Amino acid sequence: MVSQQPTLREIAKRANVHYTTAACVLNGTRGNTRVSEQTRKRVLTAAKELGYTVNRAAQQLRTRKSHVVGLLVGGVENPFFARMVALCSAALERRGYEIILTTRRSDEPNDLHLLDALLSRRPDGVLLWCETSTQVRERVQQPDMANAVVIGYGVPGRDSVAAVLQTGLHSALEYLVAHGRHRIAYLAPKHSVAREGDVRSTYYTEFMKTIGQEPTIYTFCGTAFDVDVAYARVQQIVSQPDRPDALLCFNDMTALGALAGLRHRGISIPHEIAIVGCDDLPLSALFDPPLTTIRYPLDQICDLAVQMLVERIQASQAGEWLPPRHVEIPTELVLRASA
């Protein structure tokens, strides 16, 4: 038998607050009520002790607010996206929101149906990872998508937060050139190089041409987190007579495969071949040798994206208008032993 849910009045009595204060904390019904953090914690503690759970469906019907945000990102098999989910979830929780998660498959170029599935759940707003041009990028510009923040790519008319990869790429390539690397190559999944708007391959190619070096791009048929495929591809690369003396890798997981492949072949890192990754995942400092990488400011980006979305949602619910905002955060080179 399911025990009866405690009432808001019982929770208010236990927390020694007025009924409207308990309702404000637990159901999001604000009115003119303002609640201090200390009082809020007291109400939440009382609710937990009495076994109270919020009826989200009833709350949404009553307030027209779900206190739920949709998040559409790449596959969480990739540690980069797993970390993004963790950071966004924590930032939303701190602001009183829950999350509905939808992830793209690595072999799924059409992601519009995923966004439509999220929207069918009627969230208050949506956070989207969108690094290149997709149908989602077009859909998010429609009038019913005003409560959305795009991470990774600027979208006209919508709030967005992006990392400036060019700053970190420039620092990495300049560093390699300054330290005598004459055959710098780029290693990436084939699909990432082929897609429209890939910043890494485009900037690498332009930089190499400006310094008079021929761009060399090595690709592999796999995802950005297929360490074993990158491992095998690097062993093919070092068998060539004109092998590179430095590898700029698409991300840290590709770099991990490259490091392991070079070590297996007895190649000295960085003396014979230097390795540079991109993302600065927490585990990249634990590679052997520790990985030189381009730090992607994911903590800042996720927290700012969530803050912008919450402000957008609150403004919408209050009938206020906010101009669209686009924020760019520079990336930077983190030097470690692999370069």
Image: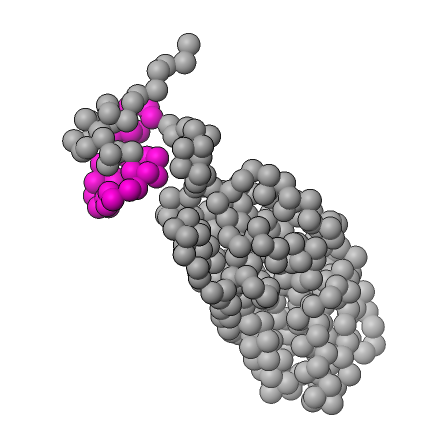
Q: Is residue 42 magenta?
A: yes
Would you identify the image quadrant in which residue 220 lies?
bottom right
Query: Residue at horizontal 16%, vertical 31%?
Result: 16
Seen at 54% across and 66% down, the residue is: 162
Q: Indicate the position of residue 26 as horizontal and vertical percent values.
A: 32, 35
The residue located at (69%, 89%) in the rendering is: 211
Q: Relative to residue 11, is residue 97 depicted above or below? A: below
Residue 311 drawn above or below residue 194:
above
Quarter of the image with the N terminus is top left
Name, please, the residue furthest toward the top: 1
Magenta region, residue range:
24-52
| Residue name at image x 37 percent, y 48 percent | 95
Which SS type dominates the magenta stretch?
helix
Q: Nearer the viewer, residue 10 or 230?
A: 10
Percent coordinates x, y for residue 294 in the rendering: 56, 70
Residue 333 lies, in percent from the top left, at 53, 74
Q: Nearer the viewer, residue 71 or 253?
A: 71
**Residue 234 seen from this side:** no
Residue 274 seen in the figure: yes
